Image (spheres, grey):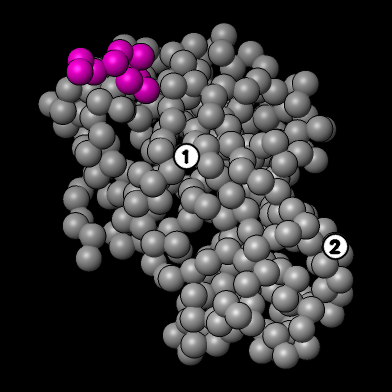
Amino acid sequence: MIKKIAGISAAALMAAGVAQPAFAQDGEPLTIGWTAWSDAEFVTKLAQQLITENYGQEVELIQTGIAPQYQGVAQGDIDAMMMAWLPGTHADYWDQVGPDVVTLGVLYTDAKLGWVVPEYVPEDQLSSIADLTDPEVREKLDSTIQGIDPGAGLMRLSNETIEAYGLDEYELVSASDAAMVAALDRAIRNEEWIVVTGWSPHWMFGAYDLRYLEDPEGTLGGVERVYAIARQGFQQDYPEVAQFLMRMHLPLEELESAMANAQETSYEEAIGQYIENHPARVNYWLTGEMAAS
């Protein structure tokens, strides 16, 4: 069981050695868009807490689909978003809005998309997406691939994967991230076969024994970077917040550990524990000052 620790206040941050820049933006709250994916929820709420407590700036989170986020940032209706998967996953969205938004920085690297199965599924029967054409494999999977929300880039690529591998007899089921994990959990408890659309980072890889299916056609893309992007003029209106987002970067293993913590406790408690456990990193995000070696 992961230890539960209460959220950390601004005073506690100061006690931990995290500097408190004096800055506030008058007027409307700063708005950040996010989608109900576990990594998006953690990094967005982490940023919200640090911005609010350290820059005196109110932050409003706007939960919506990924496509409306890109459009909202491009049109100036949303100040920023923190889930731009590039160069492949969100290529279609980026092609539409790229000239109208500003790239702030890379939140994490080595992100990955793929189709995922539980480890107990025999690898000699199902190790590659190409194996899904086998009639016996299709029967055990009830001709179903469990997906996520239909607007996700992963779903677009999954539809392309179905076409590329000749999997027309399968149904790609749309659902939320939570519903996908619930379906995975039910299958694992019953030791049933299941294929889900997955990505790293995701807390499910810490909770279950899973593996990615090989993708010899490369239809699900390669290694991705996840960026924070903002509307035009954001850096002028919120200079210190923009600098903070440019410096904000999480190692993938730290992020997945924090996401697993959030499932055991809550996002608020996991964020507090992350801040407490990484004061030098957080201080660098906030101030640009490197800790003395």
Kindly give the residue lying farthest to the left in the view shown: 15
Q: Amino acid at mark 1?
A: Thr
Q: Quadrant of residue 34?
A: top right
Please state the horizontal and vertical placement of residue 147, each as a whole percent of the image: 67, 67
Q: CA distance from mark 1 to mark 2?
A: 35 Å
Which numbered disc, 1 or 2, marks the residue closer to the eye?
2
Label 2 crowd (10 A; few <14 / some 14-19 / many >=20): some
Q: Is residue 8 or residue 259 the one in the foreground?
A: 259
Residue at point 19% right, 50% down? Answer: 5
In magenta segment, residue 187? no
Q: Is residue 11 visible?
A: no
Residue at which label 2 appears: 164
Please state the horizontal and vertical placement of residue 223, each as a whole percent of the image: 61, 43
Over which residues does the magenta segment extend?
284-293
Residue 245 is left or right of residue 176, and the answer is: left
Above or below for 116 versus 64: below
Above or below for 48 versus 165: above
The disc at residue 44 is 1
Q: Amino acid at mark 2?
A: Ala
Q: Quadrant of residue 164?
A: bottom right
Label 1 crowd (10 A; few <14 / some 14-19 / many >=20): many
Dot 1 or dot 2: first in sequence order is 1
Residue at point 67% right, 17% down? Answer: 232
Q: Quadrant of the C terminus?
A: top left
